[in-house]
Image (spheres, helix red, strand yellow):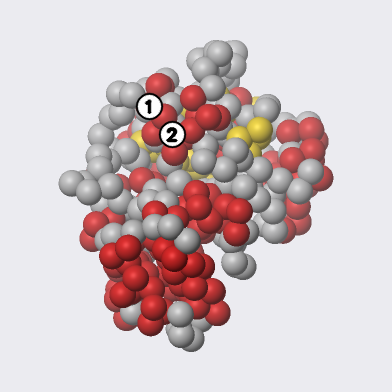
Amino acid sequence: MHALALAAGFDLCGFARAEPLPAEMLRPWLDGGLAADMRWMAETAAQRLDPGLVQPGARTVIALACNYYQPDGPVPSPVARYARGRDYHATLRDRLRAFRRGVTAEFPDVKLYGETDTGPVMEKVWAAKAGLGYVGKNGCFITERFGSWVVLAVALLDREVDAYAAAPTPDRCGACFLCVTACPTEAILDGARVDSRLCLSYQTIENRQEAPEALRPAFAGLAFGCDACQDECPLNASPKLADARFAPRPLAALSLSDWAAIDRAAHRALTAGSAVARAQFDGLRRNALYALGAERDPSARALLEPLCSDASEWVRNAARWALGRLRSE
């Protein structure tokens, strides 16, 4: 099955026994409010802790990973690296379908259920149990071959396999805390935990309210997601180039001013089939305005002033806040 996974386009594949996970792998994080308002995490907690509730009869978890690294363009993009190309969920689903076809052709009687990180699975935990790597201090999954520039999927199989991961992958973070100190909002806690309420990836993607004012100065350079901790990680110092399915699209070249001024038609055209669509039209403009205010660029004034009367309350308030930052210099 390892060969079938690689043939389907995955870069890494490993196997773990499909057994219930200890509640402490998830419950303390949820009970501490670290999931912010991502209520679906708590609503599906039971399934996340027990793959047998996701796929009855599951005996094996197949962990799968794809390298997504693509180099920066001439100008740094305000979009996180994983979201600059085609939506990785679509690419992973395509490869899961190809993997399922290959498995079914060779083993017609098996049942295989595949899922990306949108499903009720703890893909990082299973990837670690399957020997693909480990969860680093910053909560990102780190592999020896690709660092943390990977996206994950899992497949649940109703059979045992010949060999499972023999031992956990050694933690190579050691005494390094560069990712922790690189986080602009101190969102990285001990125990490889991240406080979503402080994380700029959460704030720029999932937050459907205005960002806390105390966090807005940290938005500099960001419109969607944040790679600060990954960019600083020494284990990412020698990245491998991903295949063309992860190549950046034109949206990766847009500046903060471009995102702040974008209209609905251009937004729809640029973000279709991209993970960036998750932040929605007003959310992306809000984020870009926070970032412009954080950078206190005087040249942004002409853009900010008309947006103070925008139809979106998010955008109006973000533009006013950004203007206030320019006036307070």
Q: Position of residue 269 (x, y in %)?
A: 30, 73
Q: Amino acid at mark 1?
A: Asn
Report which residue position mark 2 lands on: 230
Position of residue 306 measured from the top left corner of the image (x, y, whole percent): 38, 82
Q: Tell me which corner region of the image, top left, top right, bottom left or bottom right, holds residue 69.
A: top left
Residue 294 in picture, x, y percent from top left:
44, 55
Is 131 on the left or on the right of 33, as rendered? left
Residue 283, numbered label = none
Of the pair 224 and 25, the residue shown nearer to us: 224
Q: In percent of the image, x 39 and y 78: which residue is there?
A: 305
Task: Classify mark 1: helix, strand or loop.
Answer: helix
Q: Looking at the image, tell me whether mark 1 or mark 2 is earlier in sequence order.
A: 2
Q: In the structure shown, which secondary structural element does the residue marked by tag 2 occupy? A: helix
Q: Three-letter amino acid code at disc 2? A: Gln
**Residue tagged by mark 1?**
236
Q: How many marks?
A: 2
Q: Are marks 1 and 2 in contact (CB under 8 Å)?
A: yes
Residue positioned 18% across, 46% down in the render = 74
Residue 33 visible in the displayed image = yes
